[in-house]
Amino acid sequence: MSDSWKQAPIVSEYFSGMPSSPMPGQPNAWESAPIAQERPGAFMRGVQGVAQGIADPINALGQMFTRAGSAARLPGADKKVAEFDKYVTQQDAQYKTNIRGGQDDFDFGRMFGNVAGTLPLTMALPAGGTLGAAATFGAGGGALSGALQPVMGGNFGEQKLEQLKAGTLGGAVAGPVGNMLGRAISPTVNPQVALLQREGVTPTIGQIMGGGFKTAEEKLTSVPLLGSAIASGQGRANEQFNRAAFNRALAPFGEQLPDGVAGRDAVRFVGQRIGQAYDDALNAVGPIRLDPQLSTALTGLQNRLTVLPKETADQFSRLLQTEVADRAQNGILTPEAMKAAESQLGQMARGYSRSLDFDQRQLGQAISEAQTALRDAVQRQAPRGAADAVRAANTAYANFLRTQRAASSVGANDGVFSASQLQNAVRALDPTRSRFARGDALMQDLSDAGKSVLAQRTPDSGTAGRLLPAAIAGGAAGGAVTINPWLALGAVPALAYTATGQRALSNLLTGRQGAGYGLLSDAARRLAVPGGVALSPALQGLLNQ
């Protein structure tokens, strides 16, 4: 290695003043031309390259500081500008001759040194959570890194502007790349997506990634073949969402909806299961008193209906008299009378709630709340041994009311409802609306997650999957089957929306969590910008062409 490295001034001399004459007995390193030497081995080239890469930002700062002094008209500043530029150019030439051997192959060592030299500054910038933010912060970090490259000859202002442009471009590209790589290593899972997955729902890839990805996926539903596959995947996720809602109603019994039961069949199955559980609980409770709390609750419902037409309010009062008061003997309902009252009220509530008339729907809701008040009275008066069974039946019924109302909504196809329809039911069955406003109404966590993540329609979940093989295959005379290569190629993305593909992608996008993955993910997001900007000399060359 040449002794000219020993002749270079130390870093402190950058700011305390450059030596104006050589040491006694030594040649002036700034004036002497570089002398070609034998090219070092790969390891030493890498080591020297890293050292030179770390020195580059320091040299760039020295160039800018001396020019700042010149702009401020400090004495001798113009001379220092020329001396420092000459030193930087000479040092670069000596490095390329003595270390690189005059060859122009890519200098990985210097690139890594550039990354290390600018890392403290670029790491201080935010990484950006979205692709847009990552591009913005990456462009800022890239501009900073580009500015910290020394200028080797030519017009300083023009060269520095080119470095800023190349660095900004490199950072704007590298930022989103690092963001996507970080997501791939350890995805930041949307809490609402995570909730749905815990409930047994597998969203599509666009629904998991959200934002622009979800919007693009929605628009692709109009594309032949692929659009049908996307709609199929969305429909499958929505049916799983329906199943999760019904399972909430069955959870107090430790049960789940049987496979293959959906829509109106699911409403019928869950309703019958809750009815049987309630009947069993009533038999264990015995007679029920029409206590003051029940009377207060029913009176409150009557008062609330006074804002409706008089005939509607009177109709509610007559129902309470017929179905509750007249069945009681001395203010006590036998288990059989209680079952009859509760069952009749439930049947009428369902009927009125389906009405297209607003006043009749309000009457149906009031009847449903009267049924709930009766169930609450049973739970209050249940003996210790039967209280848990009554409580489980009441909890199951409260959840079931919301799924039942959603399944009876206008637009619910054969009783299969959307997340928006479930949320409307959750809101309507919150009497005061205060819990819904706070976000903690019964089943609101599920309806909010579904409305945020899933498609707000109920497409078919199986037709596209069944037709996919037939779509890419064509029949021929004699029973032969030929494959359409273009449709087959177009069907590849559609595989992501089959049941298996959807499940595999869900696990891939959300399955890697933990501290180790988080550290690797953060490193990928943050190191991408200085790494991309380290390629700015190459980008600068492209811009100059």
Image (tube, helix red, strand yellow):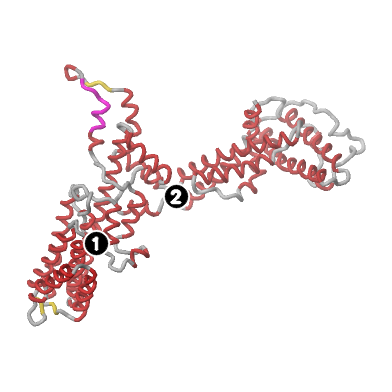
Q: Is residue 28 left or right of residue 264?
A: right
Label 1: which residue? Answer: 399
Q: Assign the magenta stretch its main secondary structure.
A: helix
The crowding category of the residue bearing disc 2, from other C-alpha atoms within 10 Å (few below 14, some 14 to 19, many at least 20), is: some
Q: Nearer the viewer, mark 2 or mark 1?
A: 1
Q: CA distance from mark 2 to mark 1?
A: 31 Å
**Vertical side of 437 occupied by 500: above or below:** above
Q: Position of residue 464 (x, y in %)?
A: 25, 36
**Vertical side of 474 occupied by 14: above or below:** below
User: Which residue is nearer to you in this view: 433 or 18?
Assistant: 433
**Residue found 61% across the figure and 44% down from its top:** 140
Q: Where residue 191 is drawn, which disc sits there?
A: none
Q: Quadrant of the C terminus?
A: top right
Q: Is residue 283 visible?
A: no
Q: Are marks 2 and 1 in contact (CB under 8 Å)?
A: no
Indicate yes or no whether the magenta region holds residue 23: no
Q: Amino acid at mark 1?
A: Asn
Q: Position of residue 419 (x, y in %)?
A: 29, 52
Q: Position of residue 225 (x, y in %)?
A: 30, 32
**Vertical side of 399 occupied by 484: above or below:** above
**Residue found 85% across the figure and 30% down from its top:** 32
Q: Where residue 188 is drawn, which disc sits there?
A: 2
Q: Which residues are magenta?
A: 467-475
The image quadrant that residue 390 belongs to is bottom left
* Mark 1 residue element: helix
Q: Amino acid at mark 2?
A: Thr
Q: Quadrant of the N terminus?
A: top right
**Residue found 54% across the figure and 46% down from its top:** 523
Earlier residue among tags 2 and 1: 2
User: Which residue is nearer to you in this view: 166 or 384?
Assistant: 166
